[in-house]
Amino acid sequence: QGARLVPDEQVRIASTKMDGIGPKKAIQVRYRLGISGNIKMNELTKYQIEKMEQMIGQDHVVHWELKKGERADIERLISISRYRGIRHKDGSPVRGQRTHTNARTFRKQ
């Protein structure tokens, strides 16, 4: 559905606008449907668009499912009191970034 928002884009570019769909997955879906990558989204038929959405929906984790999974992972880290979970809860940089002279969004006033 994210690809419908950009009707003047080529299919190969518009399909990567969806969360969870990268260039490689976009190529796989197009190949399975037999759609050229250079055709624009507004030139596709409704049937082709529905088929693409259906295939992406059943084969790949996209948008809200992806965000829901990420949130569940963070909640799990917080519940078991892992270091990364504590950093998430505090709003601190999680992946070892420097905080003494950087991470201005982290600084508490």
Image (spheres, rainbow, N blue to C red):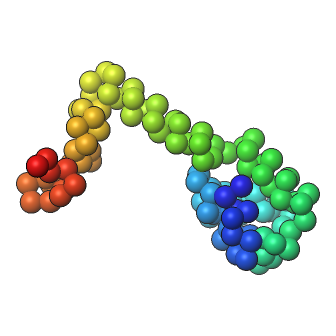
Q: Nearer the viewer, residue 77 or 67?
A: 67
- Left or right: residue 33 versus residue 85 is right
Could you tell me residue 60's position as x and y percent?
67, 45
Could you tell me residue 23's position as x and y percent?
62, 64
Query: Compared to 39, does 67 lie above or below?
Result: above
Picture quadrant of residue 59: top right
Query: Residue at image x 78%, y 75%?
Result: 40
Query: Compared to 83, does 63 lie above or below?
Result: below
Classify the position of the N terminus by image quarter: bottom right
Residue 4 can be seen, yes or no: yes
Picture quadrant of residue 76: top left
Question: In the orientation shown, which residue stands out farthest toward the front?
Answer: 109
Could you tell me residue 79's position as x and y percent?
33, 22
Query: Residue at image x 70%, y 75%?
Result: 9
Q: How many marks?
A: 0
- Left or right: residue 15 versus residue 87 is right
- Left or right: residue 57 versus residue 77 is right
Query: Compared to 38, does 109 lie above or below?
Result: above
Residue 10 can be seen, yes or no: no
Query: Residue at image x 76%, y 57%?
Result: 29
Question: In the orientation shown, which residue stands out farthest toward the left?
Answer: 100
Could you tell me residue 25's position as x and y percent?
66, 57
